[in-house]
Image (spheres, grey):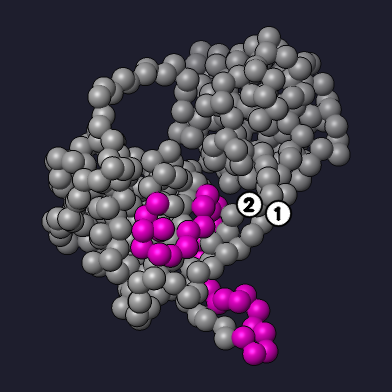
Amino acid sequence: MIEKNLEEYKGIAIYAQQVDGKLSNIALELLGKARELANDLDDKTVTAVLIGENVGGLTDELAKYGADRVVVIDDPELKDYRTEPYTQALAGYINEFKPEIVLVGATAIGRDLGPRTSARVETGLTADCTVLEIGDFPLVAAPGTEQKHKQLLMTRPAFGGNTIATIACPDHRPQMATVRPGVMQKIAPIADAKAEVINWKPALEKNNCYVEIEKVVKEVSNVADIAEAKILVSGGRGVGSAENFKLLDDLAEVLHGTVSCSRAVVDNGWKPKELQVGQTGKTVRPHVYFAIGISGAIQHVAGMEESDIIIAINKDETAPIFDVADYGIVGDLNKIVPLLTDKIKTALASKNA
């Protein structure tokens, strides 16, 4: 066990994920949340840790979205993501710079990198967080128990989404969390913002955990990224069949939106996993979200409740989806959706005439 002086750990760091020299959206989302959290800390410095090869050109973009400092770890061994060298790089940064909080995106890369790094630096990690805030722990002061202040409170769904757990790491540093993509919001870009740039070289040591990448095969996906959509037309088990999703396709087409779905639809094989919204799918935040034939289980709601406008269509007037909907229509979707599509078509044609 590494002996640590917790008082030495200051500021917030985020892992600025990049792939092929392009920053992932989650990096900018984490910067936005880090800026918010920093307001409640003594040290308000937000650092982006950028790992890769020839990635120095991304520092200005990180500054524009909230980074006070960018630590660039640039090495040919880090050209493509591999678990061991990236873990050595991030763990080395933590041991050298001692951030109080480290945030990593809960992407395919982050879910691999975050836990391994936390184990390497001997601290805890809360996975797949949906809410982060600074506060007291324990949440309620108890006799005989020290209540520590300015702790990172990490909230995540637990037990399949049936309960919500708030977790803290008061006795170890850094406090680490992986965060679901699409949950946090980027800040408005700051024109001409500049960050302090530190080029830092870790001691990367090859060992038997290194793997060699023989070949990279890029698959071209024809499936839309629902996390980026401004209008989502989402269907659930109540749609009835894969063929019946044609109704939703038609509505999405006139709205210039994208079709998405619930887990039940994916489990039935009607739609691919990439279109799933919810706790085990993607978190989305569109301007308009249509929930059609979706009952509104907590696991689904967790992935779409931050949508600007939610419109629910369901024949069951007691469906939980109506509790979160801004507008609700009780009735047969087979009649309502085609009628709605026709009305929108007519309205658009009239407007463009």
Do callouts 1 and 2 mark residues in contact (Cβ within 8 Å)? yes
| Residue 300 relative to residue 295: left or right | left
Q: Which part of the image, by quadrant, shows the N terminus? A: bottom left
Q: Nearer the viewer, residue 338 or 23?
A: 23
Which element carries disc 1, helix, strand or loop? strand
Q: Is residue 170 above or below residue 296?
A: below
The residue drawn where x is 61% and y is 14% is: 250
Q: Which image quarter: residue 147?
A: bottom right
Residue beneath disc 2: 157
Which residue is found at the position 66% from the left and 56% from the top? 164
Residue 87 versus residue 320 in the image, above or below: below
Q: Which residue is mark 1?
A: 163
Taking the spot 51% from the left edge, 13% from the top edge, the residue there is: 353
Asked whether 84 or 139 is in front, the reply is 84
Q: Which region of the structure is painted magenta? A: 116-145
Count residues near mark 2 (Cα–Cα under 10 Å), then give few for <14, some for 14-19, many for 20+. Answer: many
Tell me the kind of residue under disc 2.
Pro
Q: Is residue 166 above or below residue 77?
A: below
Q: Separation of disc 1 and disc 2 at Cα?
A: 6 Å
Q: Is residue 253 left or right of residue 207?
A: right
Disc on the earlier residue, 1 or 2: 2
As for residue 39 lying within the magenta part, the answer is no
Q: Name the residue at 40% across, 64% down.
A: 122
| Residue 131 part of the magenta-drawn span | yes
Looking at the image, can residue 119 be seen?
Answer: yes
Front position in the image: 278 or 226: 278
In percent of width and height, residue 194 lies at 18, 57
Q: Is residue 59 visible?
A: no
Whole-percent x, y for residue 237 in the image: 74, 24
- Using the image, determine if residue 274 lies above or below residue 286: above
Task: Please give left or right for residue 81 compared with residue 197 in the image.
Answer: right
